[in-house]
Amino acid sequence: MRESVDHIHGILKRYFGYDSFRASQERVIRHVLSGGDALTIMPTGMGKSLCYQVPACALPGLTLVISPLIALMKDQVDALLAKGIDAAYINSSLTSEQRRQRYEDISNGAYKLLYVTPERFRKKEFVERITQRHISLLAVDEAHCISEWGHDFRPDYTRLREFRALLSDPTTIALTATATPDVQQDILHQLGLDASRTPLFHEGIDRPNLTLEVRHVWGEQEKLDNILELISTNPGSGIVYFSLIKTLKEFSELLQKKRVPHLCYHGGLESEDRRRVQDRFMGEDGHLVLATNAFGMGIDKEDIRFVIHAELPGTLEAYYQEIGRAGRDGKPSVCALLYDEQDLLIQMDFLKWNNPDAAFYQRVYDLLSERRQEVNAYGLEWLKEQLHFKNRRDYRLETVLSMLDRYGVISGHPEGKNVQITAALPPELTDQDWLAGKLQKEQKKLYALVQYAKYEGPLKVFIHEYFGLPAPAEEEVSGA
């Protein structure tokens, strides 16, 4: 073990091309290699992944990485393979034959790093194969997803204590860019880690090279004027975020009329088109991209000079992660929120759609159970008709189907005409008090973002207070 620890600088240079570690990376890595569990919070772009990738190269067994995003897995694995590190992922993007081969590879001792979503543990064959291996390190990426207090809760993350036990409780490192004190405690609790023996490596959240701005605007024209000004005064690559695809398309047309070249990225595009846009943005200089929050994870472009939020995001955590994509080269970059109070209505609609009540969950479940043949024959629109939808922009059904899938209650989807009921409704989704509490938490998060938009002091001070951190040094908040 001592030899592995002493070789971490060699591993860093050989595989990753760096001469030295940044910030607390080395302390985290040495702690993990000594067998200690850790909770690590680092700003986006500070190199969290090295905190488990370097130990993975030093340790003799397999490092299992729990990651929430299928798209991000492929990018990370491709990068590791290009460096000569034996890595793989297993997820639903693979064919059945590819999955079968990777299961065989696991049994045969292949891979230093293996990336999976927590939902993979629902698969009996995967559990049988992975429990045959010695897991040297369990890395839980985007660990805020484990917490009901977090902004991107994933139910299967709450089973990680169970998964750790299946794997004989390996050394565990949890990593995220943002976590309030409540979320930090919940991460440790849900993982079954002893808080008194699990140090917090908190790199802070301050990025001194980022200038934060809130610009109060009214209406489309003022937004457009501010976007054009920010683009002209901050030459280079940039992202303009929108909450709605509809608004993104409208602003794309306005920019086209102004002869401003740009790319568009949103969930309505085909996967190949999204990949093409991302590759152009990553591989070429000076691009402007209009995007929804679907664009971001895996965007590791160093020279993004500005990030503009043309519509209000849903939480301060999400906002902070998105602005963290700017200025990773350490050079000055601008992060501007264009605050139009009318945009609050969009987020309030999202809260309504994202939080159906217990009666609605029960109605959907009963329809799927009792009229499954019709659901599979006629699809999503028929199901909406049975629920007496009058508003085509009511997306509660999509939320329920997503949650039922996340909780393992259904397999398949009405659009694929292959829905199957696989479990009963979990108690949470029939408990109106629990659901109301969840809605209230999300409302408080949105209110915090409104407070941020209206804050009259240094914006970085507000963000530090929100995340339970000391205020940044005076020189770091000037101009922000």
Image (tube, grey):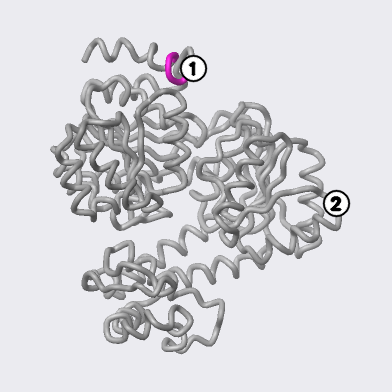
The span picked out in magenta is: 13-17
Q: Toward the viewer: 18 or 412?
A: 412
- The residue identified by callout 2 is 259
Task: Please name the amino acid that badge 2 sits on.
Answer: Arg
Magenta: predominant secondary structure element? helix
Q: Position of residue 35 (x, y in %)?
A: 21, 25
Q: Residues within 10 Å of mark 2 (few under 14, many from 20)?
A: few
Q: Quadrant of residue 164?
A: top left
Q: Is residue 149 above or below residue 376?
A: above
Could one spot residue 270 in this view of the protein?
yes
- In this rendering, the answer to whether 142 lies above or below 344 is above
The residue at 17%/49% (across/down) is 162
Asked whether the beta carbons under mark 2 and mark 1 sit within 8 Å of each other, the answer is no
- SS label for mark 2: loop
Q: Quadrant of the N terminus?
A: top left
Q: Which residue in the rendered view is the most extreme toward the right?
A: 258
Q: Separation of disc 2 and disc 1 at Cα?
A: 41 Å
Q: Residue at x 28, y 55 (%)?
A: 156
16 magenta-colored = yes
Q: Is residue 450 visible?
A: no
Q: Residues within 10 Å of mark 1 (few under 14, many from 20)?
A: few
- The residue pinned by badge 1 equals 17
Residue 300 falls within the magenta-colored stretch: no
- Seen from the viewer's position, the closer of residues 67 and 339 is 67
Q: Residue 183 in the image: x percent, y percent?
A: 35, 48
Which numbered disc flags the more N-terminal residue, 2 or 1? 1
